Amino acid sequence: MTRIVGAVRAPVLAALPVFAGLCAATPALAADAPPAIDSGDTAWMLVSTALVLMMTIPGLALFYAGMVRKKNVLATVMQSFTICCITTLVWMIAGYSLAFGTGNAWIGDLSHAMLADLGAHIAKGVDIAFTLGEGSPNPTVMTIPQSVYMAYQMTFAIITPALIAGAFADRMKFSALCAFTVLWSLVVYAPIAHWVWSPLGWVAALGAIDFAGGTVVHINAGVAGLVCALVIGKRRGYGHDDLSPFNLTYAVIGASLLWVGWFGFNAGSALGANGRAGMAMVSTQVATAAAGLGWMAVEWWRTGKPTVLGIISGAVGGLVAITPAAGFVLPGGALVIGLAAGIVCFFTATTLKHKLGYDDSLDAFGVHGIGGILGALLTGVFAYGPLSATDANPTGVVGSAHQLLVQAEAVGVTIVWCTALTYVVLKVVDVTIGLRVTVDQEIEGLDMSLHGEQIN
């Protein structure tokens, strides 16, 4: 028996150092291993991508089409659909790389140009996630494939120039729209997206927080819309002709699709199926409802009648304002942000633009610009510390003076960059192919004069 035990003991003891070495090496190997894809997170992000795409087509297309005159309905839908197609290819060729490539603090490089690198791991038979912002002090380790993240961000890049179209509805040349979309996406949208959302971006390094696009999407689109309205000029008949919406039923359907799709916009920005996504969904619902009722109440008080156009406009204003805050605030903060957005956007859309005399046809600036600015600033007031802490601003329970200051700085640089570069892009397009349709085309309507089609 003793011989048997000794015979077994000897090889076991000899193997112990080897086994210990393997155990010691295991953590190092795990640390070096690429992040694994989480199927639940990936499934949610695939759904979110589809929801955000639905916001543009058919959501925004119907929302805007319902608010223009009958002779411009098809042209308005055509704008949203065409922008979706153009921006998809721009994003594939260079936009994604400029926004989320490694690059530097100001712009990404062309490492993802043509998306040539997305299939590298698949070709090698490796199914792994990726790290965003490699080389930065705080890279983001993803649990989804880069292809899904790229497609999700593509839908944000699509809806932003589509929102701008509401400001110059009824009067921009279709060729000018196409050229403007390409240039604006590359020289205005992509850099701001890199500043704010890339871990390498200089605005992100300040500690500014923008959960789902208050600066990148809404302030950017709203300010660009205002610049477009000023440069192109007013619609013929503005201020004295009947410019009433053709079909508010279209607009209500469009607004409803926007509301539903916005859950992909906001809850999807958690980049996973997790508690932050749930909180963002709740905040989005609360703020939107509060804003719709806030606009309706003020309008009812001012005019004696609550209108369909009013409540859907207010709801969209609430969606806009909660976007930068959705994953960073509690429901109580979302309620205040929504009410404030409904009231403030009402006065901007119905009073300010008339006093200042600019023709923002479908209130791209009044709702998206003002709502985005308000939401970005109030994020600094209501941001809940455990949800919103960053390395640049790790303290605070609910908001802080520092966070509000940083938010204001992010708003300011977005406005300045967008204003200057949008103006340059418009002038380049105007000098080369012209911006505005002829007087006869505008009178006839863009449906027939530009596209040879009409609604019977």
Image (spheres, rainbow, N blue to C red):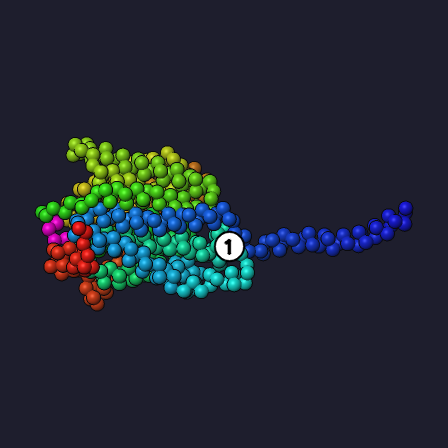
Q: Look at the image and give the residue range highlighted in magenta.
A: 235-239
Q: Please provide percent x and percent y for residue 401.
A: 37, 41
Residue identified by numbered label 1: 129
Q: Residue at x 30, y 42 (%)?
A: 256
Q: Please provide percent x and percent y for residue 297.
A: 23, 33
Q: Please provide percent x and percent y for residue 209.
A: 39, 47
Res. 340 visible in picture: no
Q: Residue at x 49, y 59 (%)?
A: 135
Which SS does the magenta portion mostly show? loop
Count neighbours of disc 1 (C-alpha within 10 A) and say few if under 14, some if 14 to 19, many if 20 or more: many
Vertical relation: 290 (above or below) 394: above
Q: Please provide percent x and percent y for residue 304.
A: 16, 32
| The image quarter in which residue 255 lies | top left
Q: Residue at x 12, y 56 (%)?
A: 444
Q: Residue at x 35, y 61 (%)?
A: 89
Q: In the drawing, does residue 314 fall left or right of residue 410?
A: left
